[in-house]
Image (tube, grey):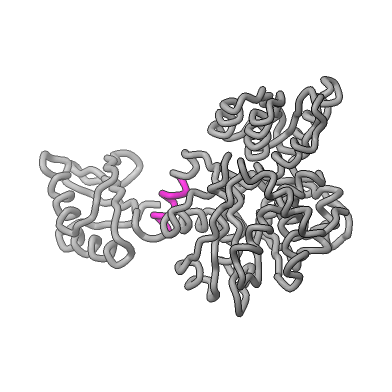
Amino acid sequence: MLGSAYERFADAHRESAPIARWTPVLTSASFSERCGGTVALKAECLQRTGSFKLRGALNKLRSLPSDCSGVVAGSAGNHAQSLAYAARHYGIPCEVFMPDGAAVNKLAAVRAFGATVYQEGDSVDDCVALAQERGAQAGLTFVHPFDDEQIITGQAGVGVELVEDVPSLAKVVIPVGGGGLASGTALALKARQPDVQIVGVQAVACAPFPESLQQHEAITASAKPTIADGIAIKRPGGITLPLIDELLDDVVTVDDEAIADAMVLLLERSKLVVEGAGAAAAAALLTGAVQPASTGTTVAVLSGGNVDPELLGIIAVRGETRAGRRRRLFTRISDRPGGLAAMLASVAKAEANVITVEHVRDGVPLAVRETGVVVTVETRGDDHLAQLLEELRAHGYEVREDG
């Protein structure tokens, strides 16, 4: 087990300081009001390479001998980006195995940092195995994404910064994939502030820690697709499991719906782009899976911001719909010149914004010279939507929500 001397972690943090950013802890009235306590956000999503992983990669590479011929790793994206960035900085060749379904933007970033990328395997676990095999064959140093003492020591920099930045720290909520970030952060925090509560959060689609902690042995979890791919690790590490067992007060799970809602709220209210894995801690607080401390400050660690732009767009639109600001409406109009314009004039009078208009002539009962129309509208919320529906019905349109 790693030693818990705070100075060791502080020294590693100082060594990385020229490259790794000291990320901000941001107060959040929106989260505090919704969660019922003082909540702040540790924005590791603003770290170079977009995640906390750079801290561990820098520390690991500093520990390698000068004659190291290169490094190799398996990763869904964040570990790959950080290792490639650190390897470029230290002038070390880098190879990375990434899953077939890895996000395009993450693949591009890894290649931009100069690493050789092999896109193989269905999961991070597959890629880790492939990287280990490649390392043995080519004489490269395998760098595990989480189950490595030097990696964990580097990740402890998050805890070092929290100790310095949050004097009223009472609770830390932190995403857990393989457990490297949670282990390192907890080691640093408990060494200085043993009374601080630390709660880990996993995506329910891939959550091996709750059962593994209960059984006191590493259990391989079944995994389903999740937007929190960065923490979709099927099996805890041999180093991290006992550390999580010893240092964390609890590990809870959240589903993708809650994670998506947290991503939207972080985007809208905090102006932070956070990936699914990075939003897991915020989701746990918003859903009540974790209660904020009754006194002092609760910090949600936003571990990464490398979200695929297409996915972010889908989640943002979904958020608009759930908030009642974007709805699809179906009605019937006259299939004559001016029929559509008349209906849209009513929408404009209600001051709603039209996003799309789609004619529907098949699969719905229509009179002769009549057509169906599906209109996607943007409103200010449920009250505004009710005003729009009232305006349309006042002009003779039978309207229902579509889907």
Position of the N terminus by quadrant = bottom right
Instruction: For residue 365, say whether it is visible.
Output: no
Displayed quadrant of residue 60: top right
Tell me: residue 130, above or below residue 359.
Answer: above
Which sits in the foreground, 161 or 215?
161
Residue 319 shown in magenta:
yes
- The residue located at (65%, 42%) in the rendering is 54
Q: Main secondary structure of the magenta part?
A: helix
Does residue 210 appear left or right of residue 83 in this picture? Answer: right
Tell me: residue 361, above or below residue 231.
Answer: above
- The residue located at (46%, 58%) in the rendering is 265
- The residue located at (29%, 43%) in the rendering is 356
Displayed quadrant of residue 162: bottom right
Residue 364 point in image, percent of width and height? 32, 45
Among all residues in the image, which is located at the extreme bottom? 294
Tell me: residue 61, above or below residue 254.
Answer: above
Does residue 116 appear left or right of residue 339 in this picture? Answer: right
Residue 191 shown in magenta:
no
Q: Which residues are magenta?
A: 314-322
Instruction: For residue 158, say whether it is visible.
Output: yes
- The residue located at (40%, 60%) in the rendering is 323
Which sits in the foreground, 158 or 396?
158
Residue 118 point in image, percent of width and height? 68, 24
Residue 101 point in image, percent of width and height? 62, 33
Residue 65 point in image, percent of width and height? 82, 31
